[in-house]
Amino acid sequence: MTIPIAAWRALVPSLWAIWLIYWVVAALRTKQIAREEDIRSRLSHHVPLILGAVLLGVPRIFGATLEQRYHPHTFGWFLAGAVLVAIGLAFSILARAWLGGNWSSMVTLKQDHELIRSGPYAIVRHPIYTGLLVALLGTAIVVGKWRALIGLALFVIAIVRKLTIEERFMSEQFGEAYARYREQVPALLPFLI
């Protein structure tokens, strides 16, 4: 069975649109910034992020080879990808809501920054990134083309780079408390890393 084109065009982009609307509205309720990363640091994760987004989201931009499918164009693959998108985005929204005013799109420390260790932060230290990676994997499955897998790989690189910078900021801010947290809770994948 082939994927109905209308379903692909409606479901997965709609999930991402709902996520984006929440993200923009939630960004209005954050604490003041006390310290932020410099522009070179920001570019080190923004550049692969942007390239990943282009590869994942823009068809036919890099030629016919990357437009070839890596799996069959079936409803089963579509459904598996769409479920991962929904689960991943929901988990990232939960984590974002749990973090509250401490959240920022850039690597920052906020005024009166708190070390959040409950809710999704008791499962992984970076649940927003975990959720986004699951959703991006789902999107790559829905797209089903080699460019999407390469885009996903670039997202992984960007997120791991940003996570590394955040870990340094949090270690400097919370010292021994963050060191204990790192020992007790994995960064991205429960029970693994």
Image (tube, rainbow, N blue to C red):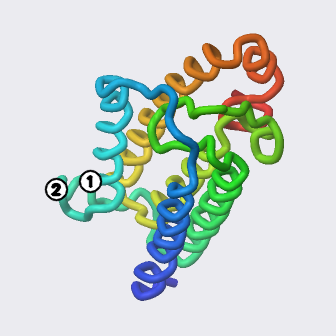
Q: Looking at this view, is 187 or 118 the one in front?
A: 118
Q: Are marks 2 and 1 in contact (CB under 8 Å)?
A: yes
Q: Residue at x 54, y 60 (%)?
A: 138
In this rendering, would 100 be left or right of 20?
A: right
Q: Quadrant of residue 5?
A: bottom left
Q: Is residue 93 above or below residue 157?
A: below
* Amino acid type assigned to the residue bearing label 2 in the image: Gly
Q: Residue at x 57, y 43 (%)?
A: 31
Classify mark 1: helix, strand or loop.
helix
Badge 1: residue crowd in 10 Å (few <14, some 14–19, many ≥20): some
Q: Is residue 147 above or below residue 80?
A: above
Q: Residue at x 62, y 41 (%)?
A: 102
Q: Residue 171's spot in the image, x, y percent? A: 64, 16
Q: Quadrant of the C terminus?
A: top right
Q: Is residue 10 above or below residue 175?
A: below
Q: Residue 61's spot in the image, x, y percent? A: 18, 58
In this rendering, would 40 be left or right of 110?
A: left
Badge 2: residue crowd in 10 Å (few <14, some 14–19, many ≥20): few
Q: Looking at this view, is 150 or 112 the one in front?
A: 112
Give the label on residue 66, or none.
1
* Mark 2, residue position: 63
* Amino acid type assigned to the residue bearing label 1 in the image: Leu
Q: Is residue 161 above or below residue 84?
A: above
Q: Quadrant of residue 58?
A: bottom left
Give the label on residue 2, or none.
none
Q: Looking at this view, is 113 or 134 the one in front?
A: 113
Q: Residue 166's spot in the image, x, y percent? A: 55, 27
3D distance between C-alphas at marks 2 and 1: 6 Å
Classify mark 2: helix, strand or loop.
loop
Q: How many marks?
A: 2
Q: Residue 177's spot in the image, x, y percent? A: 78, 18
In this rendering, would 16 be left or right of 42?
A: right
